[in-house]
């Protein structure tokens, strides 16, 4: 089947088609030998079992309906593929650097088309490139899984860091409040000590004043006598 027009790959996965293969309809087969006539004293001969058409016959039939492309890539095709590659990258606005799924998809199509062209000229080389492509895909899938795991781990660490930062800010606020309360307590103690000292001085002055009044009264009574 021909893939959509936006793909750089012209045909499906490359397969090696033998030029000497010919199509024979599985429904109509030439009769090579005449069937023997049945005798009256023998039982009927059972029909021969139908042989299943193998996959090669099916492929040959499909190839006869839609002939595969047998032409390899020439320099003109390579230049045309390069131009199409640049046009696709610019048309779909693929990023030049960094991770870009669009750029990855377009280059994968280009690589598949190159494998198709090489496979037509040399099947062994095409199979080797196919192995290289599969290895690259597995490596990219592993890196993608690792990247997703790293992103998830980073998100968890960020959330834990946010919780830790909030707890630290709360702790700093409590420490500051504690220091303020300690200062207020010390100030209150200092005021209480000053008030106590003033009260003691006032009481001392009151006692002294009372004693002086008593002494004055005694002296006054002595003079009057």
Image: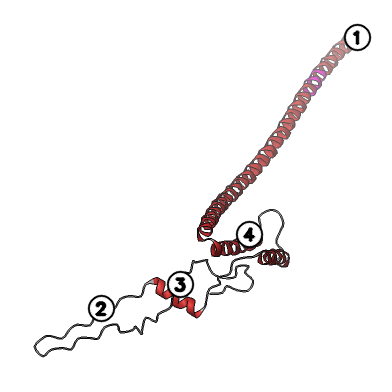
Mark sitting on residue 20: 3
Q: Which residues are magenta?
A: 198-205
Which corner quadrant holds the C terminus? top right
Q: Please count the marks in the image.
A: 4
- Earlier along the polypeptide chain: callout 3 or callout 4? 3
**Front position in the image: 184 or 136:** 136
Find the distance from the CA under tag 4 to the CA under tag 1: 125 Å
Residues under labels 3 and 2: Cα distance?
28 Å
First in residue order: circle 3 vs circle 1: 3
The numbered mark at residue 30 is none
Residue under label 1: 223
Q: From the viewer's perspective, is the residue at label 3 or at label 1 nearer? A: 3
x, y percent for residue 1: 53, 74
Q: Secondary structure at mark 2?
A: loop
Of the residues tagged 3 and 4, which is closer to the observer?
A: 3
- Residue under pointer 4: 104
- Mark sitting earlier along the chain (4/2): 2
Q: Do the CB atoms of the residues marked 3 and 2 lie less than 8 Å apart?
A: no
Tag nearer the camera, 3 or 2: 3
Q: Which residue is mark 2?
A: 49
The residue under the point 71% across, 65% down is 83
């Amino acid at each position: 089947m021909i893939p959509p027009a936006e793909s750089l790959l012209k045909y499906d996965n490359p397969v090696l088609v033998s030029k000497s293969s010919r199509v024979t309809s599985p429904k109509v087969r030439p009769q090579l030998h005449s069937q023997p006539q049945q005798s009256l004293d023998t039982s009927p001969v059972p029909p021969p079992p139908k042989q299943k058409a193998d996959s090669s016959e099916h492929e040959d039939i499909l190839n006869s309906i839609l002939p595969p492309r047998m032409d390899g890539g020439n320099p003109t095709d390579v230049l045309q593929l390069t131009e199409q590659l640049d046009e696709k990258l610019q048309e779909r606005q693929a990023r030049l650097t960094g991770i870009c799924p669009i750029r990855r998809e377009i280059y994968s199509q280009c690589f598949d088309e190159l494998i198709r062209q090489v496979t037509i000229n040399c099947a062994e080389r095409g199979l080797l490139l196919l192995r290289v492509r599969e290895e690259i895909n597995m490596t990219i899938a592993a890196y993608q899984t690792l990247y997703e795991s790293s992103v998830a781990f980073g998100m968890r660490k960020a959330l834990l860091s946010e919780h830790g930062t909030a707890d630290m800010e709360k702790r700093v606020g409590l420490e500051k409040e504690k220091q303020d309360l300690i200062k207020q307590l010390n100030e209150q103690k200092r005021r209480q000590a000053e008030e106590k000292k003033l009260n003691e001085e006032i009481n001392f002055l009151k006692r002294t004043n009372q004693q002086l009044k008593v002494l004055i009264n005694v002296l006054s009574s002595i003079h009057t006598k």
